[in-house]
Amino acid sequence: MKPAPASLHARHRAVMPDWLGLYYREPLELTHGEGRHVWDAHGRRYLDFYGGVLTTMTAHALPEVTKAVGEQAGRILHTSTFYLDRHMVELAERIAALSRIPDPRVFFTTSGTEANDTALLLATAHRRSHQVLAMRNSYHGRSFSSIAVTGNSAWSPTALSPLQTLYVHGGVRTRGPYAHLSDAEFTAACVADLEDVLGQAHGTVAALIAEPVQGVGGFTAPPDGLYAAFREVLDRHGILWISDEVQTGWGRTGDHFWGWQAHAENGPPDLVTFAKGLGNGMAVGGVVGRAEVMNSLDAHSVSTFGGSPVTTAAALANLTYLLEHDLQGNARRVGGLLAERLRAIAAGLPVVREVRGRGLMLGIELAERDGTPSGRAAAAALEHCREGGLLVGRGGREGNVLRIAPPLTLTVAEAEQGAAVLEQALRRSQQDLD
Ligand code: PLP
């Protein structure tokens, strides 16, 4: 008798490394998508409250993006950074204009990791120092340099590092020594911590890298103005500010196009990194920054696939749609309503410690009865949501935060549908704990 064919999950496990995590007891295979919905291999439809991984910025199978990809793929898939490319130049011009950085330059990469790697390379070359500042509880990718600035060992699989990193407070507010402080007190305490850390540094520090809203860290944001207050200190030491906008860029946070604009008093960052949503799922990321810093490398350096024609054609179509349809405004409006609804649901459920976030980047932090972070409640809620036809993400230091980041075209009706599923899922998670 022939052996039964192995499931895709078994084949995945046999050939992929163990550390490549999958969601769900029975992992999903998604086969297609449209708008805010995706379908699995069994034909089951889900409302996608995670937008891939914040990658589907506008909508699944957005006709404008699909057409741009198809047309470019039919012309030529790849040329080379050694030749001129119309889409690459036009996209760089658009991003330069949107960056609000004076005299900017743009470099394209294929991922957020590579974008941060490049920013750190530029900053350390410019400042001639390998000493950098990063935030506790941060996540910046999985290359040697980006894990070296990732402030949680659970996401940073080796301590070997080409950088010397000093960690500062400012990401997490729900626990630790700075919990329960007012915004002004929290900001003052973090600035004092930054000053203290700089007092212990060995000479020159190259840069601070920070996410305006921590993504993998559980969608936690410092008070508005924290990085403006940091900037004052950094400027005194000539230290560069790198804003990692891989999750927060392109209007996702609703009030602002870039996350750093909540901290804009003392001017824009020196370097901004981006990826995820720009290409609506196509692999395109990059860095935009001040020319003086961007031009710091004095050897020839390229990215073979960074900014390739198909990805930049997709990004141009996606960005055009996003701006023409004011999706930042939609993120603010629909995200605001969704946050309100989730807070009302949470009011009756002790398992929910906090609903937080901005625009369409909302986190639901879960806790045990005694207030300790509950990864198991989040894992259960994820399964319950799936059973209800809703996909959400998970994050936070203990995996105890549900992450909601749908495509920015989410409608009010879809927000309400998703909230109803979340309500049931959270009630069941509460019962699981009781
Ligand atoms: N920076 C942030 C803030 C991220 O959330 C991520 C990925 O989740 C990265 C960088 C790394 O991006 P990528 O997975 O495209 O390498």
Image (cartoon, rainbow, N blue to C red):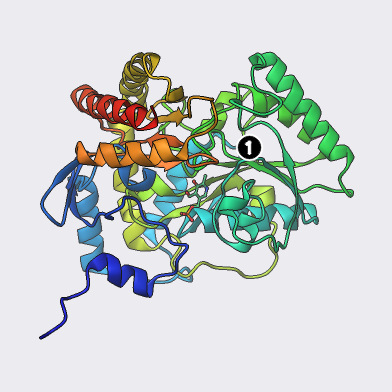
Q: Nearer the viewer, residue 120 or 54?
A: 54
Image coordinates for residue 87, horizontal then vertical, percent: 36, 56
In the picture, the quarter occupied by the N terminus is bottom left
Q: Residue at x 89, y 48 (%)?
A: 203
**For residue 135, side relative to residue 88 (left or right):** right
Please determine whether, in this image, residue 204 is positioned above or below residue 14: above
Residue bearing mark 1: 269
Q: Residue at x 23, y 24 (%)?
A: 420
**For residue 120, side relative to residue 57 (left or right):** right
Q: Identify the amino acid type marked 1.
A: Pro
Quadrant of res 361: top left
**How many numbered markers are drawn?**
1
Image coordinates for residue 189, horizontal then vertical, percent: 75, 23
Quadrant of res 236: top right
**For residue 272, side relative to residue 275 (left or right):** right
Q: Residue furthest bottom?
A: 1
Q: Residue at x 31, y 42 (%)?
A: 51
Q: Please indicate, yes or no, whether residue 393 appears anywhere in the rendered image.
A: yes
Image coordinates for residue 180, horizontal then vertical, percent: 64, 17
Image coordinates for residue 35, horizontal then vertical, percent: 19, 40
Quadrant of res 229: top right
Regarding mark 1 in the picture, which secondary structure is present there?
loop
Q: Nearer the viewer, residue 169 or 239?
A: 169
Q: Residue at x 70, y 65 (%)?
A: 298
Q: Residue furthest front?
A: 434
In the picture, the quarter occupied by the C terminus is top left
> Counting other residues with Cα less than 10 Å from the Cα at mark 1, is it few (<14), some (14-19), or many (20 or more)?
many
Please determine whether, in this image, residue 342 is positioned above or below residue 131: above
Q: Please indicate, yes or no, whether residue 48 appears anywhere in the rendered image.
A: no
Q: Is mark 1 within 8 Å of ligand 1?
A: no
